[in-house]
């Protein structure tokens, strides 16, 4: 039986969304976005009726009254952002000419079929603007020459060059009440344009605005909260069942020994919390604490656990009710129905063998792959693993499929790039440098109840799957299955049966999978609505980086237990609307639960950072809870630590630096910091060439224009090969990654201005915790000290005697005489470095190609091509 998702209510919810959005006035949205920031206390302008996100809610109505208006504010912001690129330039989406091929009207919606001049750039769920005339930026600024008839349209589907659109021309919905619709002339003027079929006349202009795939799914999930089994828990952010701490599941002794041997104390507490009766388990993973390793341990436990009630200390079954004792004749009747061959001919013997098939032994096309299931379980748990972004998701998939990583190192491509660099893996020649918390030893990965390596059936669903996990991607598995059945297909391909075959294959793969991986957004796609069996457990990684409606999307597929894994003091969810953000829409479900006092399992042992790096973030953000793993200090010592100015932690005060803002941009740059970092990097690689041999050094900045300037200067100074040696990116682009050395450029330097979102302590935390051995902060101490967190960091550097005041000319700062003065008095034992004899320093391996550069399919079989599946760590917009 298919998963019951209450189709009628879901459809009504989607239609409600369409009625509200499709009636909006495109030009009014832009005029409102140009107004000064809304003050939530006064309730001026667009903020009228908006409510701030609270920790708890008394009922579903209060919950929806809060989140629905904020979600629609985010839709408006996406429409505005869809008009321009990051740098304020046109998106490149041009006006298209369209003719009406046919038209119909259903339930108050107009559904014309149009033929566009460039249909290939349009996908299902795209939001388009239809108009009787095209207009440009100059018309909009002067408010002259604008069309009199225009309306939004949603792409229902595309059939070759024909596109089915959905329009709501009845009027504009007022105050989110779909029964209160106000007619307007611009919409009424559109009716004859979309009703009249003109196959050979060019009657309409079409402009692509943005995709609504993701936010429609979030809206449906938000509205479906009333049907979730743990609705009250989500509203109250509290578990009212006092027995939830009890152990509901038990794992075998061999598996217990494996888990306890391969996980530290806080990781074990998190795993065992997952075996309780709690519907929601929150796991906080600070930088370098082995969050992914904990997820793998959790999967081993929940996939092979048995109900605790079937065990006792004496080996007797407890807590199991016996069934009724039946009379002997009734027992015989039951046996006869269950096993008729005991009293006659086996029904299977009536089937004549075909082509030598004896009816039992497997033949081609009848392969039997039995799975032994413990008799006390008799049920295989199914797990859905989600993340907001593709890169975060693929990190877990890669860890899972490479459970014996050390044996597979030789198989890694010489062009080790993409996901490997995204996760901090660096390759030079035959040497692969792997972060400690990424290593998968021979006894790691998922294990079964007997502590044997376990390889469950898994599938990675959705777009943009990295090539490293292709072997388990849905598209690849479907193609493999089709190829294996080609000989039996006959003329199906000619008859157009391939598409139908693909649908059935996808459904069977999804139903057979033990673990399904999907982005949060894609877990709301139509494919999941066809499940024959829902999921028992949902695990959401990077849960603190998702807005609450996004977190609810996978829960609508049905589950019994939810794990939220993330860190609320690292990067937050990306919210485009400044209005919605002011009212708390960026707060994740994880953070809301934590603020309401819900218990959180925190991972406390870190394996990444030198203790000198770990010291400040542990005190500032984690209440001194972080502790160092065994040998971390020794493993992160480096030769360059003989100088105080090269780490492990230091702050360079560029007190003469000045910030500037490129024309027409909301971003900032600091040329002085760039100049200083060039000298710093040059001195480092001249003394320690091993840093040049591989991408072990990162330059991080909160501002995309500063990143752009760094890249330009490094190319002009060190050549284009520097792209492969130095990883330069925004703070958002480095979430979840690590490097040996990180240089953090703060940019902001003024006498009287603020520091913008550099003041966001979560970005600060991410920026200074990417390094394993050395983090070097470059900024204006006097400017940064206006913020409490940055003031504490500057004072921490002062107390440790690693605050260096730098004056011009910067080229002389690292002179031999200065370096001599900055030598550490007490010599530190040096960790042996890799020699450069076998390293081709001049031709470094490119490990920085972004996984997002892969070509994407022109159209997806599920109609989701081109959708935005969460935030993949690109540059952060809306800077200040």
Image (cartoon, rainbow, N blue to C red):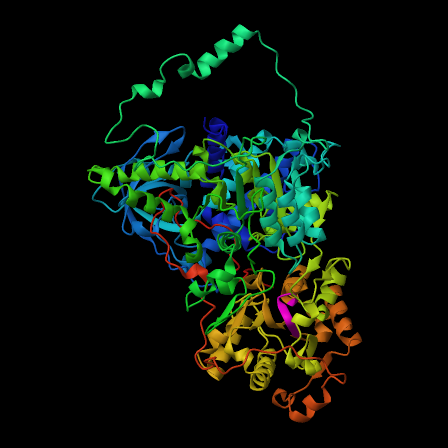
- 251 vs 354: above or below: below
Residue 787 visible in the displayed image:
no
Tell which of 719 and 355 is nearer to you: 355
Quadrant placement of the C terminus: bottom right
Quadrant placement of the N terminus: top left
Which residue shows up at 47% across the image and 28% down it? Answer: 7
Residue 442 visible in the displayed image:
yes
Find the residue positioned furthest to the right. 799
**What's the magenta region?**
768-777
Residue 869 shown left or right of residue 830 in the figure = left
Give the quadrant of residue 740.
bottom right
Tell which of 70 and 654 is nearer to you: 654
Which residue shows up at 69% across the image and 26% down it? Answer: 318
Secondary structure mostly taken by the magenta-highlighted segment of the chain? strand
Where residue 864 sits in the image (x, y, percent)? 40, 45
Find the residue positioned furthest to the bottom. 817
Residue 845 shown left or right of residue 754 in the figure = left
Residue 472 shown left or right of residue 501 in the figure = right
Where residue 853 sits in the image (x, y, percent)? 41, 61
Q: Would you say residue 630 sits in the magenta stretch?
A: no
Where residue 462 sits in the image (x, y, percent)? 43, 47
Which residue shows up at 49% across the image and 63% down it? Answer: 420
Give the quadrant of residue 435.
bottom right
Tell which of 787 and 880 is nearer to you: 787
Give the quadrant of residue 616.
bottom right
Where residue 680 sits in the image (x, y, percent)? 60, 82
- 31 vs 311: above or below: below
Tell which of 804 and 608 is nearer to you: 608
Q: How many marks?
A: 0
- 430 vs 394: above or below: below
């Amino acid at each position: 039986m298919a998963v019951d998702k209450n189709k009628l209510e879901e459809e009504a919810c989607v239609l409600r969304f369409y009625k509200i959005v499709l009636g909006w006035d495109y030009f009014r949205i832009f005029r409102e976005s140009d107004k000064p920031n809304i003050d939530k206390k006064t309730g001026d302008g667009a903020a009228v009726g908006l409510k701030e996100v609270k920790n708890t809610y008394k009922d579903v109505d209060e919950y929806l009254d809060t989140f629905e208006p904020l979600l629609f504010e985010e839709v408006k912001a996406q429409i505005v952002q869809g008009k321009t690129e990051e740098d304020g330039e046109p998106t490149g989406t041009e006006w298209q000419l369209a003719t009406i091929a046919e038209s119909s009207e259903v339930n108050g919606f107009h559904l014309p079929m149009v033929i566009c001049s460039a249909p290939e750039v349009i996908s299902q769920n795209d939001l388009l603007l239809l108009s009787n005339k095209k207009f440009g930026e100059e018309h909009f600024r002067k408010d002259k020459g604008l069309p009199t008839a225009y309306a939004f349209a949603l792409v229902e589907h595309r059939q070759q060059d024909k596109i089915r659109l959905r329009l709501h021309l009845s009027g504009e919905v007022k105050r989110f009440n779909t029964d209160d619709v106000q007619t307007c002339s611009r919409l009424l003027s559109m009716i004859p344009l979309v009703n009249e079929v003109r196959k050979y006349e060019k009657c309409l202009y079409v402009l692509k605005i943005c995709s609504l795939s993701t936010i429609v799914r979030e809206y449906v999930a938000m509205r479906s909260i009333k049907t979730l089994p743990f609705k009250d828990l989500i509203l109250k952010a509290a578990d009212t069942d006092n027995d939830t701490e009890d152990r509901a599941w038990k794992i075998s002794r061999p598996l217990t020994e494996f888990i306890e041997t391969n996980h530290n104390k806080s990781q074990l507490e998190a795993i065992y919390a997952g075996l309780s009766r709690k519907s929601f388990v929150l796991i906080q993973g600070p930088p370098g604490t082995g969050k992914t390793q904990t997820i793998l341990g959790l999967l081993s436990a929940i996939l092979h656990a048995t109900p605790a009630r079937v065990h006792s200390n004496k080996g007797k079954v407890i807590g199991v009710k016996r069934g009724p004792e039946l009379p002997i004749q009734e027992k015989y009747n039951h046996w006869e129905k269950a096993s008729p061959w005991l009293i006659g001919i086996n029904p299977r013997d009536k089937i004549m063998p075909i082509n030598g098939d004896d009816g039992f032994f497997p033949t081609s096309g009848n392969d039997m792959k039995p799975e032994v299931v413990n008799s006390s379980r008799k049920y295989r748990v199914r797990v859905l693993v989600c993340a907001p972004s593709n890169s975060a998701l693929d990190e877990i998939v890669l860890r899972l499929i490479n459970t014996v990583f050390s044996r597979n190192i030789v198989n890694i491509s010489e062009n080790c790039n993409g996901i490997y660099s995204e996760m901090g893996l660096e390759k030079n020649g035959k040497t692969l440098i792997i972060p400690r918390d990424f290593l998968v030893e021979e006894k790691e990965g998922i294990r079964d109840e007997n502590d044997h390596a376990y390889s469950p059936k898994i599938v990675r669903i959705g777009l943009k799957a990295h090539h490293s996990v292709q072997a388990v991607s849905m598209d690849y598995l479907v193609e493999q299955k089709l190829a294996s059945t080609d000989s039996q297909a006959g003329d199906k391909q000619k008859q157009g049966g391939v598409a139908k075959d693909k649908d059935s294959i996808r459904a069977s793969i999804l139903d057979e999978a033990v673990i399904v991986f999907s982005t949060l957004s894609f877990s709301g796609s139509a494919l999941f609505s066809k499940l024959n069996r829902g999921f028992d457990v949902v695990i959401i990684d990077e849960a603190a980086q998702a807005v609450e409606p996004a977190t609810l999307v996978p829960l609508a597929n049905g589950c019994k237990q939810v794990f939220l894994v993330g860190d609320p003091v690292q990067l937050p969810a990306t919210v485009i609307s400044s209005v919605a953000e002011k009212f708390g829409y960026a707060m994740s479900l994880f953070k809301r639960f934590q603020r309401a006092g819900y218990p959180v399992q925190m991972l406390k042992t870190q394996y990444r950072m030198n203790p000198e790096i770990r010291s400040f973030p542990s005190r500032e953000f984690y209440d001194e809870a972080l502790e160092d793993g065994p040998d971390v200090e020794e493993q992160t010592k480096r030769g360059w630590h003989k100088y105080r100015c090269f780490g492990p932690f230091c702050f360079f005060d560029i007190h003469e630096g000045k910030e500037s803002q490129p024309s027409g941009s909301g971003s900032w740059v600091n040329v002085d910091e760039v100049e200083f970092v060039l000298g710093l990097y040059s001195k480092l690689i001249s003394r320690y060439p091993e840093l040049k041999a591989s991408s072990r050094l990162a330059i991080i900045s909160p501002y995309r224009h500063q990143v752009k300037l760094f890249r330009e200067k490094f190319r002009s100074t060190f050549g284009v090969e520097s792209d492969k040696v130095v990883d330069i990116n925004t703070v958002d682009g480095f979430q979840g990654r690590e490097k040996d050395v990180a240089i953090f450029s703060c940019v902001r330097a003024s006498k009287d201005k603020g520091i913008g979102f550099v003041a966001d302590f979560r970005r600060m935390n991410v920026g200074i915790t990417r390094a394993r051995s050395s983090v070097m902060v470059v900024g204006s101490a006097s400017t940064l000290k206006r913020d409490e967190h940055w003031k504490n960091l500057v004072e921490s550097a002062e107390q440790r005697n690693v605050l260096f005041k730098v004056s011009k000319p910067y080229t002389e700062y690292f002179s031999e005489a200065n370096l001599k003065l900055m030598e550490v008095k007490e010599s530190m034992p040096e960790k042996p470095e890799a020699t450069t004899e076998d390293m081709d320093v001049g031709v470094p391996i490119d490990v920085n190609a972004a996984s997002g550069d892969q070509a994407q399919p022109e159209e997806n079989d599920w109609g989701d091509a081109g959708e935005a599946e969460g935030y993949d760590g690109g540059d952060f917009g809306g800077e200040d």
